[in-house]
Image (spheres, grey):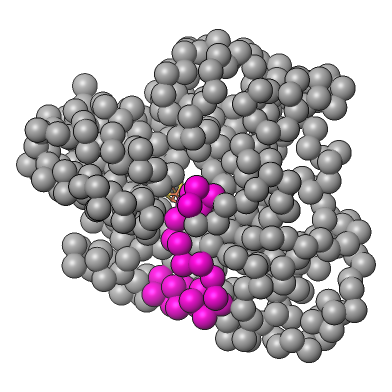
Amino acid sequence: MYLSKEDEGILKGKSGIGTQKALELLAAIGDAYDARRMVPITRAHAAASGQEGDLYFAELLANGGARCRVPTSTNPVYDIGYFHRMFSNIPKDEASVAQKVVEAYRRLGAILSWSCVPYLNENIPLYGEVVSFSESSATPYVNSVIGAHTNREAAQSALAAGVIGKTPEYGLLLEENRKATHLFEVEATLSDEFDYSLLGYYVGKIVAYGIPVLTGIDRRPSTEEFINFCAMSNTSGAVSMFYMPEYTMEASSMDEAFHGDVPKERAVVTDVELKEVREELQTTAGEIDFVQLGCPHYTLKQVAEVAGLLDGKRIHDGVAFWVCTSATAKLLADRIGYSSQIEKAGGHLVADTCIDEPCWIAYKQKVGMTDSPKCAYYRRFKEVVVGRLEDCVNAAVKGRWG
Ligand code: F3S
């Protein structure tokens, strides 16, 4: 891969060892994918979590004096002080890793957003920008809904790109690789974001690394519906980009999406397939111990819906009720009063964290209910019930589902 004189100097350590390590990683990726050159990026999102691999790389760069050259946002970790007040059994070694990840990203000069939907508030690409975004919903959302260009980055490659301000040009950064592969004719009823979650999960399993086109969708999906489709298709599969002609930014027709070619595979999606996805993810029914919402992080609109659904109700004794959101949405929810409405009913609205963090160890042997197939897939608890938001709220009030 061609490197500029400045980059050659960085590789020789002239800008410090942290920056050198970041470029070494990007150069190796570029060589592996036969990239011809590096291209500038305008922003990055590093989907690190509070785990040891993330810590190793972030500290390697931070201890070597690296700083982010372009705005680089961060994925959820957890608010250590808050969770240690709530639960006494979070392992000290895991908490210490999370604390050190937070410190390393602070030293790297990252945007400490701790959000998995940074493209809504803290780090928003525009159409046509070249960026390096990791995280399940972020990569396909940025490519398809916004029309920026990113590869499906890892936390480490996105952080390295944020430090260097460049990324190797390969994959989805090249027009010819943005060609659709699969066609889905959607006949299923899509009434809310839960249906889009199931659709995404189903599509991702079939497509794997391909680029699907979805037709038959009779109205523009909402922001939340797009977010959930993106997160789930990039969890059950590795969908980095998709087309819904008329609703996504590139390709106004099927022919354009397939670059004039024909689909490799076609499928029709009906309510039956979506029902099967839900049944496959759900492991139990009956009594529940807790409800977990906000995977991906709930938007302010979703937080408002939870507050509205809980109005005048009380969560059942013995059921915990958690809603995860971004710090930005939480701040507004506090101001507007949604947080206190949720708390009044016995629930918690919490920022900066993720269902896949060690702070939830108290629920390891419990039965949880969620509206998120991704949460069910990464299940950090014993059994799971999957239902739409209203089902989750009703079950939390009754203490059981079904
Ligand atoms: Fe976000 Fe964590 Fe779910 S990063 S999408 S809350 S697994």
Q: Nearer the viewer, residue 87 or 380?
A: 87
Q: Nearer the viewer, residue 174 or 362?
A: 174
Q: Quick check: can you spot residue 151? A: no
- Stretch of the chain drawn in magenta: 97-121
Please check the rendered image and state whether residue 98 is part of the magenta-colored stretch, yes or no.
yes
Residue 27, percent from left and from top: 81, 68
Residue 246 versus residue 165 in the image, above or below = above
Q: Quick check: can you spot residue 129? A: yes
Total residue callouts: 0
Residue at image point 9% right, 33% down: 312
Give the side of residue 81 with respect to residue 30, left or right. left
Residue 199, percent from left and from top: 52, 25
Give the side of residue 398 with respect to residue 6, left or right. left
Residue 252, percent from left and from top: 74, 24
Q: Nearer the viewer, residue 131 or 319?
A: 131
Residue 281 versus residue 51 in the image, above or below = above
Residue 211 versus residue 332 in the image, above or below = above
Which quadrant is the C terminus positioned in? top left
Which quadrant is the N terminus positioned in? bottom right
Residue lying at the far front in this picture: please name it.
336
Residue 281 occupies quadrant:
top left
Residue 41 versus residue 315 in the image, above or below = below
Residue 171, percent from left and from top: 79, 47
Residue at image point 51% right, 62% down: 74
Residue 309 occupies quadrant:
top left
